[in-house]
Amino acid sequence: MSYITELLKGEYGYLATLAIVLLSTKFLGLASRKVHMPAVVGALFAGIILGPSCLGVVEETDFMRKTAEIGVIILMFLSGLETDIEELKANGLASFIIALIGVILPLISGALVYYFINPEGQASVDILKAIFIGVTLTATSVSITVETLRELGKLSGKMGTTILGAAVIDDIIGIVVLTAITSLRGGGDVSLPIVLMKIVLFFIFIIIVTMIVFSAKKIIHHIKLRRRISIYVLAFCFILSFCAEEFFGVADITGAYFAGVILCNFGSKEYIDHKFDVLAYLFFSPIFFASIGVKTNLMDLVKSPDIILFAIVLLVVAILSKVIGCGLGAKLCKFKNKDALSIGIGMVSRGEVALIVAQKGENYGLLKGNMFPAIVFMVIVTTLITPIFLKLILSEDKKALS
């Protein structure tokens, strides 16, 4: 394996790495379908097997990291493109309530886990570190949930729209909380009021962009069947993603999602969706899903019994706090039991959002290096089980209707 690893580190090794990742994600994706699981589960396992946790033949490089980022941007753009605006309007309040409870419960639960287990063995618990652990549990990454719902044909319905709306609000609340913690720690670059102002300005920016795009609707309809519309739309997606991160401090995937939402009612929607779906399927999405398993070495967990206990308890709390919190929010909004449970499960996946939060915490001294694998373990397991349980519960609905 060492020879293969060295070979892949060569000047043109990235080409072989891409081939290995694409073939393995496709093969294991097909295997997942054979056992009636979403293809994304196989893609995730491919990353774990190829990464340092198992074979160690593929390492996370800057090229893979940026390619994966493009993959998740395109995926979230497609989810925005498939958004039903009328459903989103009807479920806006529900999404806010679900997101709010889905942040508060994990935040408190994660902080209590750190407080009582105290994995670092300190004489006294650092309250800011405890709160930060809670912050890592508040993150929600619906990229894989989106793909699963798309496979099952549930993305554009009331449940899928509510999950997407709640996830967007969830990330915004998470940004505010994270900024507050890092500011108190002395590592924040900006104050909390400035962050709140930037978030408000971001939504004003989105409204202005929407008005400009709709004013040019006739021109867009005129070129909708021309091939270059795909180039314009891709550039538009990237520009909004860039502006979200660079100027407003909002996640780039949020900008990509709103780019899709702005275009979702245009006549060229089906044409754009087809072109982007091919782009994502052939290259970017497999890289993104595989990259999650390549980010860390899970074998680091076995080095300390305290970290093992912390990781297991944190995982259980991460799952239950989202299922109960978001499920309870859905029930308060008059969702049926099965739909409320599906929404709770759909919000469990932490994905790349939690990894970004964890990385920032490590930079600010809020997360020690030996605790990082525990966070990654929680991220990977929640990411793996979300599509599995979501598929199981939604498949039961299909059987009941047949």
Image (cartoon, grey):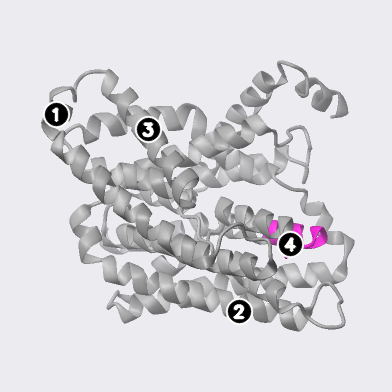
Q: Is residue 38 left or right of residue 61?
A: left
User: What label does residue 22 carry, if any?
Assistant: none
Q: Residues within 10 Å of mark 4 (few under 14, many from 20)?
A: many
Q: Report helix, strand or loop for mark 3.
A: helix
Residue labelled with disc 1: 221
Residue 340: image location, x then y, percent: 37, 72
Residue labelled with disc 2: 109
Q: Residues within 10 Å of mark 3 (few under 14, many from 20)?
A: some
User: What label does residue 277 carry, if any?
Assistant: 3
Q: Residues within 10 Å of mark 1 (few under 14, many from 20)?
A: some
Of the two numbered discs 1 and 4 in the rendering, the one whose residue sits closer to the viewer? 1
Q: Amino acid at mark 1?
A: His
Q: Gap between marks 4 and 3, in whole Å?
A: 34 Å
Q: Report helix, strand or loop for mark 4.
A: helix
Q: Report helix, strand or loop for mark 1.
A: helix
Residue 110: image location, x then y, percent: 63, 75
Q: Report helix, strand or loop for mark 2.
A: helix
Front residue of 140 and 380:
140
The residue positioned 21% from the left and 62% from the top of the image is 89
The residue positioned 76% from the left and 62% from the top of the image is 365
Region in magenta: 366-377
Please tell me whether residue 57 belongs to the stretch shown in magenta: no
Residue labelled with disc 4: 374
Q: Gap between marks 2 and 1, in whole Å?
A: 50 Å
Q: Amino acid at mark 2?
A: Ser
Tell me which label, 1 or 4, sits earlier in the chain: 1
Residue 165: image location, x then y, percent: 35, 60
